[in-house]
Amino acid sequence: MTIAKPFLRWPGGKGTYLDLLHGQCPPGSIRAICVGGGAFEWSLRAKGREVTLSDANDGLINAYKQVRDNLPRLLEALEKREATSAGFDAAKLRYNIGRGSRRDTVGAAADLIQLNRMCFNGLYRENQDGHFNVAMDPGKLGCDLVREELLTACSEALQGTPIHCLDFRVSIARAGRGDVVWFDSPYWPGPDTKGRTGLFGAELRPSFTAYTAAGFGSQDHHDALEALQAARERGAWVLSTNAWEDGWVGRYRARGFQALPFEAGRPIACTQEGRATVSEVLFIGVPLA
């Protein structure tokens, strides 16, 4: 039997260190913010945990909703697609022209799934106009776009799961006593980190922040820290991951967060040699009320 797992590839996926996350995740209703591919979220659902999904990327959230609510129509749309260069270009054109309807259409979800399956390493990036602008990976020509068994398992697992397209500030503000905020934000913005090392001698992780046209910059990270601290003061637990960066780690520690360092792989790279081990951190915030 096929189990529910990410049907989208996404930068910064947590599939390789689920044991660490489960080991630190307290009981409670999970508010998963910046859901991305949702590796941890799928594993939480498999354990029967109550999970609410949210992300500011309207195309991503639409894909989750269509898998949950309109699977037969989505499968039909995917079956009509061709995993060719022309098919990729057509999907990109439709997705970008139809930007305003990404929130609520089966076609837009099929476009995103095709683009995600066929683009370079599943990287999602938008330019300032909100247009998806990642190139096709020639190695994905002819790939299976439908994956009916996987999408069926995901649809079943998503039944009854609340899914929202929201700014992270709004999502965190909804968390209160008894909730667990799981905040998997984009990585800290910064200069090129190639060749720089952090903990364990691992390479520092470059940031990929253009998941929406607005990006995710330093002010967003400052706002996130304040919002997460406010959630703790309302009685929520907080789990959040990011790249290990001494300045930001110091800011979180100053607010009483525990910082657990760990090593992770970096799958987003042009070459196999570039996919180095990198330094990351899991922040744990206990309730303050």
Image (spheres, rainbow, N blue to C red):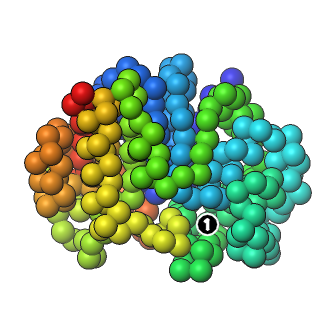
Name the residue at 43% across, 62% down: 268
Q: Above or below — where is 278 with respect to 209?
A: above
CA neighbours of label 1 inside 10 A, class few (<14), some (14 to 19), many (20+): many
Q: Which residue is mark 1?
A: 119
Q: Is residue 199 above or below residue 2?
A: below
Quadrant where the image shows the C terminus: top left
Q: Amino acid at mark 1?
A: Cys
Closer to us: 29 or 131: 29
Is residue 207 visible in the rendered structure shown here? no
Q: Position of residue 161 (x, y in %)?
A: 62, 32
Question: Could you tell me which residue is drawn at 65 percent across and 59 percent down?
Answer: 59
Which of the two residues, 37 or 101, is positioned nearer the viewer here?
Answer: 101
The answer to whether residue 163 is visible is yes
Q: Is residue 284 left or right of residue 66?
A: left
* Quadrant position of residue 137: bottom right
* Residue 65 locus on image (x, y percent): 70, 44
User: What residue lies at 54% left-to-right and 35% top-to-bottom?
Assistant: 52
**Residue 91 in the image, given as x and y percentages of width and height:** 76, 69
